[in-house]
Image (spheres, rainbow, N blue to C red):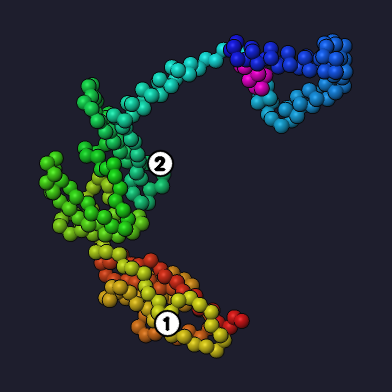
Amino acid sequence: MEQGTLVGTILAWFMLLFAMTFNFATLSINAGNVQYFWDTPSLMIVFGGTIASTFISHPMGDAKGFLGIIGKSWKPNSVQLVETLTLIIDVSKIARKNILAIEVHNYSTNSSDLSCIPFLTLGYNEEQDDVQEPHPSMTLPNSYLHTNFKISSSGEDLILSDDQGNVQDSIYSGEIETDMSFGRYMEGETWNLFAEPTPNSSNSTQAYLGALSLPIFSIPSSFYDQGQEITVSLSNSEPSSVIHFTLDGTEPTINSLTFEYPIQVNSSTVIRARAFLDEWLPSKTESKTYIFGVD
């Protein structure tokens, strides 16, 4: 038994008996006072109710387990705190030196099952002995594609240099849309956006010169009086782009209405617009709502 458990138990019983037998008026011990604190029906109600509520509130297995938990409090603690803390410190020191990371990727954007391509990243900060290659059954690529840093989606410089600090290649990524990749098309000189990333293979999917920005509305969403009429124009930062729009709340496509002249609006209308351009990724959809006849 742990010393703390023994001392605590003895102290609790001593204080309980002392409080029941000590007469604070005469400053004397009177064992007969115990009878005033003993009431069999009350004890049955308290302890019986406690046990009954325990079985009612918990599954039978958990309720039985409470007895085991009480029993453990009388047994020596099997966890050696000093040894455990020493082990944690030793493991943390190892983790600072050598890091093993495992991550998996779907085979394609359309694969939603558990089939995946595993990638291992093992970083050593000191020389290691008896290092073994991954088992051939894992079919890992010869080169590991992932780095220990990230590139900002808003655009960032990426520089590839040798161990002497000489720049071998560099590129400014520019803003990258969500779920898009940025790379050289077929290992050529042209950098493009790709809607379908191709890890461990050539960038041979549909390539885009860039992503179009959102269409610009000449008038923001607002409320207007009945009988009033407004004129809405649409534009884009890429002058060569073509803007398609809808007036029924549906998603604009390349087959939707083409913006050529200002749109006359005199009743409650939702205009949704999207920019398109050959070899460019279409813009996201921008929507504006104009409500008429609201007091």
The residue where tag 1 is placed is 232
Residue 184 quadrant = bottom left
Q: Position of residue 147 (x, y in %)?
A: 27, 42
- Residue 251 magenta: no
Q: Position of residue 272 (x, y in %)?
A: 44, 73
Determine whether 181 is above or below 277 in the image.
above
- Residue 67 magenta: yes
Residue 205 quadrant = bottom left
| Any part of residue 255 in sight | no
**Mark 1: amino acid:** Val
**Magenta region's main secondary structure?**
helix
Residue situated in front as seen by the camera: 217 or 179: 217
**Secondary structure at numbered mark 2:** loop
The residue where tag 2 is placed is 114
First to last magenta residue range:
65-73
Q: Marks 1 and 2, how far apart in space?
A: 49 Å
